[in-house]
Amino acid sequence: MLSSSRRRSARARALLLFACGLLVLAPVVAAQETDEAPSRFPPLDTEVMVPELARPADAPDTDPLARFRRLPSGPAVDTPTRPTAPAVAVGPAQPIEPPPVRRLTVMLDWYPSPRHAALFVARERDLFAHRGLAVEIVTPADPDVPTKLLAASRIDLALTRQPLLHLLVHRGQPLVRVATLVGLPLTALVMRADADLPSPTSLAGARIGHADLDGEAVLLATLLDSQDVSRESVDSPDLHFRLEQAMREDRVDGVIGAERHLLARALADEGLATTTLPVEAFGVPRHDGLILVANRNHLSRQRDAIQHFVEALEEATAWILEHPEESWPLLAAAEPTLDTPANRAAWPEIRARLSLAPAALSRTRYAGFERFLFETGVTDERKPVGRLAVDPGARP
């Protein structure tokens, strides 16, 4: 009879042999199960319904998706469970608001004239409107009014002449040149051919009317100085721009400051012969014949609008010079009062003097005119060019 220890040893050896047998048979059984058992994955092209992941009510806070499930979801929210999908806006597009319109009131220096051509062409060709400007061109009832209204902030821009600008600035007016429409002098001394002068070579004792401040203080003074004639020896009534009427009525022997291309022709059409002497011929420096002036106190606020306005004038002037045959019919249709024999005859001469670059500033010209006024005693100081004229496109 076997002892208990020997029985336990025999039982252990039997269990060991049984385990070894299982290890030998395991690969065979696994291979059979692989051949017979169904696959854990569906065949290709099989539609599979994937349930929406949802956070169980009792999900612990350590759930890695917990913070994403609490975020908003939808087609425009990118989350791990609902990736972003492109959205399409449905409905009509909102209308684009038009840019604001800047309004400018511009006053002429006197009645409409061919020298104002750039203004009228820019208006008729919608060059102001294309730049967001609503421009009103006004004719003054009195030629002394434009610069006064501008200084009083009643209008935005005015037309005048360079010599008059210098005098007004020296009188404290807040005016500044921002563009040049005609870059050469337009004025002259116009005398009656039948004038009964005391001396053919001297104006002493003559009756010479003037139209404005610069006509008397600058043009007439320079004329008399060139002949060494005193101011007291000449009768010079203020004709207040009624130059043609005074000449026709023989109230004066001549006028200073008249527009050289218009007055002589208008008087000739009425049978009155005249002689014309340009102001440069007796010592007046070359200057801008027609300029656009603004109120200096408002220049910073209006600079952009004025710059666009001047750009429109430049485009209009270029069109005038490139279309000589079309420009006059356009002007005559825009301002019927322009269509006179004198204006038609003067148009080629004035057209050739229009400034191709209205904004361009000749600092030398303005400084030179200041020096001339100071040296002749018309003014008692010299103003800096920056006080008299600016280029609106050049930022300070």
Image (tube, grey):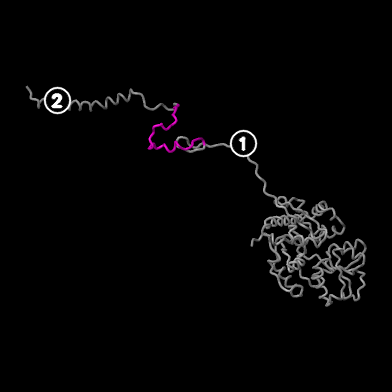
Q: Residue at x 71, y 72 (%)?
A: 382
Residue 103: image x %, image y %? 72, 52
Quadrant in which the N terminus is drawn: top left
| Magenta part, dominant SS | loop
Q: Is 107 situated left or right of 363 in this image?
A: right
Question: Where residue 354 is drawn, which disc sits there?
Answer: none
Q: Quadrant of residue 359?
A: bottom right
Which residues lie in the magenta part? 47-75
Q: Is residue 52 magenta?
A: yes
The crowding category of the residue bearing disc 1, from other C-alpha atoms within 10 Å (few below 14, some 14 to 19, many at least 20), is few
Residue pushed farthest bottom? Answer: 228
Question: Where residue 91 is drawn, which disc sits there?
Answer: 1
- Kindly indicate whether the residue at mark 1 contacts the one at mark 2 (C-beta within 8 angstroms): no
Helix, strand or loop under label 2: helix
* Cα–Cα gap, marks 2 and 1: 88 Å
Quadrant in which the C terminus is drawn: bottom right
Decide: is 121 above or below 287.
Answer: above
Decide: is 3 above or below 362.
Answer: above
* Amino acid type indicated by mark 1: Gly
Helix, strand or loop under label 1: loop
Decide: is 295 above or below 372.
Answer: above
Q: Which residue is mark 2?
A: 11
Q: Is 214 situated left or right of 204 in this image?
A: left
Q: Quadrant of residue 48?
A: top left
Frontmost of labels 2 and 1 is: 1
Residue 370: image x %, image y %? 73, 71
